[in-house]
Amino acid sequence: MKKERIIIDMDEVIADPMGAMIDWYLREFGGHIDFARMLEGSWSIGFPEEHRHLIRERLHQPGFFRHLPVMADSVRVLEGLNERYDLFIVSAATEFPNSLKDKHDWLQEHFPFLNWKQLVLCGDKRLVTGDHMIDDHVRHLEHFPGKRWLYSSPHNLSVTGYDRIRDWKHAEEIFLG
């Protein structure tokens, strides 16, 4: 019997670049971050306008994506999903070319049960197909032919029209319950 395929995004889903960026910014500048503005569709607009270019530059630096925190419970739940489903990690990573090796190495460290064939680093997720996709950005979900799951993140809390996954414990209930 063929296993159902689940496509899972990396950033803001299993990796926490927003948390890493906030920690870095507070260490370096100690400035004010407007968390309410992050709810407007992009977490980067929560940083002071005069420093937003630094946020973008940091995303392009080698090593940034290599040392991101792992989202709570994601390792345990993905290990269970990997046993039951045809699992792929798909990231629109080519926007940040330095992230390609970083993301590969990060996955090998934190999710060693996934093999290299389960990692897709691309520029446009319209090329992927499957039964389910879990992503924090609607732009990646809107063209997906299967079941679309919006992974809750501060930048998408006002988005409606998608079934949500609150966190990895919630995903565990849905897919492994």
Image: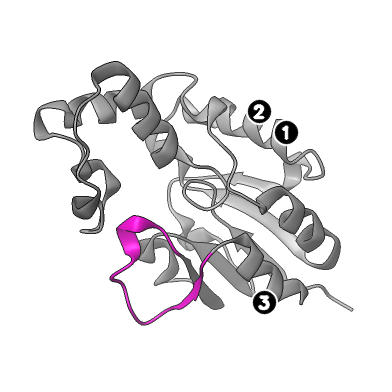
Q: CA distance from mark 2 to mark 3?
A: 29 Å
Q: Position of residue 37 (x, y in %)?
A: 18, 52
**Nearer the camera: disc 2 or disc 3:** 3
**Disc 1 from disc 2: Cα separation:** 5 Å
Q: Quarter of the image containing the N terminus?
A: bottom right
> Which amino acid lies under the numbered mark 3 shown in the image of this protein?
Ile
Residue labelled with disc 3: 174
The answer to whether 106 is drawn above or below residue 7 in the figure is above
Q: Disc 2 residue type? A: Asp
| Whether label 1 touches label 3, CB < 8 Å | no
* x, y percent for residue 99: 49, 29
Distance in Å between CA atoms under marks 1 and 3:
26 Å
Dot 2: what SS?
helix
Classify residue 137 as left or right of residue 42. Answer: right
- Write down the residue under mark 2: 105
Kind of element beneath mark 3? helix
Query: Residue 122 in the image: x percent, y percent?
Result: 50, 45
Main SS of the magenta part reads: loop
Q: How many marks?
A: 3
- Kindly identify which residue carries mark 1: 108
Q: Are marks 1 and 2 in contact (CB under 8 Å)?
A: yes
**Residue at the spot x=50%, y=30% of the render?**
65
Relative height, residue 31 to residue 112 (above, below): above
* Residue reaching furthest to the bottom: 161
Q: Amino acid at mark 1?
A: Gln
In the image, residue 164 lies in the stretch drawn in magenta: yes
Task: Locate residue 45: give its quadrant.
Answer: top left
From where the camera sits, is residue 121 visible? yes
What span is in magenta? 152-166
Q: Nearer the viewer, residue 71 or 132?
A: 71
Return the residue nearer the eye: 29 or 14. 29
Mark 1, secondary structure of its residue: helix
